[in-house]
Image: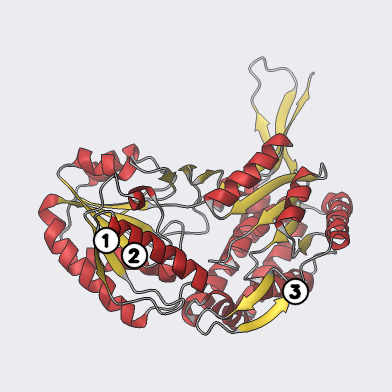
Amino acid sequence: MSLYTVTDPATGEVVRTYPTAIDAEIDGALANAVTAGRTWARATTVAERAALIRRVAELHAERAAELGAIIVREMGKPLEDAIGEVKFSASIYEYYADNAEAILRDQPIELLDGTGDALITNSPYGVLLGIMPWNFPAYQVARFAGPNLCVGNTILLKHAPQCPESAAAIQQIFDDAGFPAGAYVNIYASNEQVARLIEDPRVAGVSLTGSERAGAAVAEIAGRNLKKVVLELGGSDPFILLSTDDLDDTVAKAAAARLDNTGQACNAAKRFIVADDLYEPFLEKFTAAVLAAGEDITPLSSVLAAERLQAQVDSAVEQGATLASAGKRNGAFFPTGVLTNVKPDNDVYYQELFGPIAMVFKAGSEDEALALANDTPFGLGSYVFTTDAEQAKRVAAKIDAGMVFINGVQADGVELPFGGIKRSGFGRELGTLGIGEFVNKKLIRTVA
């Protein structure tokens, strides 16, 4: 049976299967990527490659409805949100089309002894392997492929097994945009084939967005083979509320931050840490908002995902947590809910809940709020809400995370670097930092 299957999570219907690649196909894909790197990448300028990426952006915009419908079939996202994801992906490609040449220009170095000259040039790493997840099938590819193709790296792209239709549609876009064979190659690879690719000396680097388990496995193989890796893994992002002059607005933002993509986002707010004077009114309003949203909730990505989340929630309650829930699970449809009274001896305290379940905590002081926020193995994003600007800066500086958003949610941008620390991974995507991860920053020194 093929690994790559489109199963509509709303109905459980198997829509279509795609054949898993045989070894000869993987070998051919890698050979083509190597050839494209030696021919196309070396024969083109950044500006020429950026022009092709601009066409990729245009095709994403033109085919947004088509790509959005595919995403709905594969992982259950509402159509409006799926189309929005595709359009945001187009913006990522456009950003790099507009800015790659300037970001990658040579950087002169002022020599201390004043003799001769020196500069840093930016050249490609080589063939890169991208391993992508199912929760944002177009966006995740964009933030990896867009900048790296501008650099001149060539790409083997292994998408999630439940997103083969998105994978094929995106491959078609790169083909239609004018990229030569081997520049961007979709592969329906098995885990064993991926491991062999990472070990292959022709693969220069690996980027993975996914689970801790997958990240650890990829990093282990890459480490043994001395390969550069970028990992964007899980998160249990804190939402710290210290003060507000509009509690209703803050609650609305908190609910949106938890329920985006049915709670299936690595950087969604998951742990809500509230100052004790606001705790009771916030909890009442927030719980009402989260439970009301359950009336319109879309399914999780699969029945398996819902079963995993159910097991976590059941375990949390058995270990002493209190659950307010919108109902009972029905297949992949998972009821929204709020957990309270979660203590450090409860397993869920240190876990990521990948679905529409929030945890709410009370903090007696700013220091206690920070201690709660940082008491996690993860360090992806975080949110701070306060009316005190100095407090916002102070707290943001002390949060152990790769990103902090103050008084706002869903404020990501194509120009803003994305990534985390601790068990949330390492490296950055998007913005100027994202394009620099797989670049050979070569020193060229001329002595007078």
Q: Is residue 206 visible?
A: yes
Whether the residues at callouts 2 and 1 have beta carbons within 8 Å, the answer is yes
Question: Looking at the rendering, which quadrant does residue 263 occupy?
Answer: bottom left
Mark toward the start of the polypeptide (1 vs 3): 3
- Residue 365, relative to residue 10: is it above or below? above
Judging from the image, what secondary structure is the residue with disc 1 in?
A: strand
Q: Residue at x 56, y 43 (%)?
A: 427
For the residue carrying disc 2, how many other residues have a C-alpha within 10 Å: few (<14), some (14-19), or many (20+)? many
Image-based side of 136 in relation to 376, left or right: right
Q: Which residue in the rendered view is the most extreme toward the front?
A: 318
Q: Position of residue 251 (x, y in %)?
A: 23, 65
Q: Which residue in the rendered view is the most extreme toward the left?
A: 277
Q: Residue at x 63, y 74 (%)?
A: 60
Amino acid type for the residue under numbered disc 1 = Leu
- Residue 322, relative to residue 442: is it above or below? below
Image-based side of 229 in relation to 175, left or right: left
Q: Residue at x 71, y 45 (%)?
A: 205
Amino acid type for the residue under numbered disc 3 = Gln
Residue of label 1: 339
Judging from the image, what secondary structure is the residue with disc 3 in?
A: helix
Q: Identify which residue, 370 or 5, lies in the foreground.
A: 5
Residue of label 2: 357
Residue of label 3: 172
